[in-house]
Amino acid sequence: FTAAATLPHEYVGFFNSYSEPQVEGWLAHLSRHARSPGVGLAGVSGSHESVLSGWYLSNPGLDQMATPKTLLWLDRHLPRRLAGPVTRTLAVPPMPFRDFPAYPNPHVRTTGFVVRRELFAGLRDNPLLEKWDAARLESGRSGLTRQVQKRGLRPVVVGRDGLAYDVADWPKSGTFRLGDQGNLLVSDNHTRYFDAATVPEREWLSKLSWGSAAFAARATRRAG
């Protein structure tokens, strides 16, 4: 955000230190789509993962509660900074898990993206003092992607093939935690970890990001 407030450029791009471009012209692909009409955020990868849903799925005894119906109730009753008791018979996750929407929670991963500088400079809504703050900025209830969408703009993922994928097409993009990730425009430490993981580990990581087929189908119907 300091860079965005200082640089004179119309567009800025941010990538983590683990980034490895996978094809020549990668930045041109991102820049072209970031400038497309109606696009507010162009990233190299995205995910439907939810920190909140992942908390349920990762806790033995609670994983069966991570159903679309339960998660819908959580979305309605666990807003940020929830105060007071929750009277429903339900295991309530501790803070800061409540700061995140339930699955599906589409967001552009902040490991690599291009955005209009003026737009980006106005998106921050919380101090960035610790790792949880960064996670909220990436995929929280008031994260970058959601703020861009509230402005009537589209977040897109750009693949190695040079195409831009809208939110509904991310699970078919062949990028983050999908198949062999062969369409990744820029890899990072998390995508390389996925490449090296065992089959069960890859299945688990894919489920966190995209849900099982049945779970994803039910959640999509619920969201619609």
Image (tube, rainbow, N blue to C red):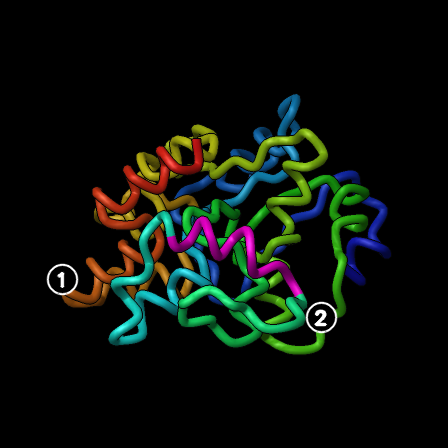
Residue at 52% across, 47% down: 108
Of residue 39 and residue 204, the one placed in the foreground of this image is 204
Q: Main secondary structure of the magenta part?
A: helix
For label 1, the SS is helix
For label 2, the SS is loop
Is residue 17 found left or right of 194 in the rendered image?
right
Q: Tell me if residue 35 comes above or below residue 144 in the rendering.
A: above
Question: How many residues crowd mark 2 within 10 Å: few (<14), some (14–19), many (20+)?
Answer: few
Residue at 41% across, 51% down: 103
Q: Please, what is the three-letter code of the amino acid marked with disc 1?
A: Val
Q: Tell me if residue 114 comes above or below residue 207 in the rendering.
A: above
Please identify the residue farthest to the left as the structure is shown: 199
In this rendering, the count of numbered labels is 2
- Quadrant where the N terminus lies? bottom right
Residue 28, position as x, y percentages in the image = 56, 35
Disc 2 target residue: 128
Q: Tell me if residue 119 comes above or below residue 204 in the rendering.
A: above
Disc 1 target residue: 199
Q: Please, what is the three-letter code of the amino acid marked with disc 2?
A: Leu
Q: Which residues are magenta?
A: 70-80
Residue 24, position as x, y percentages in the image = 44, 41
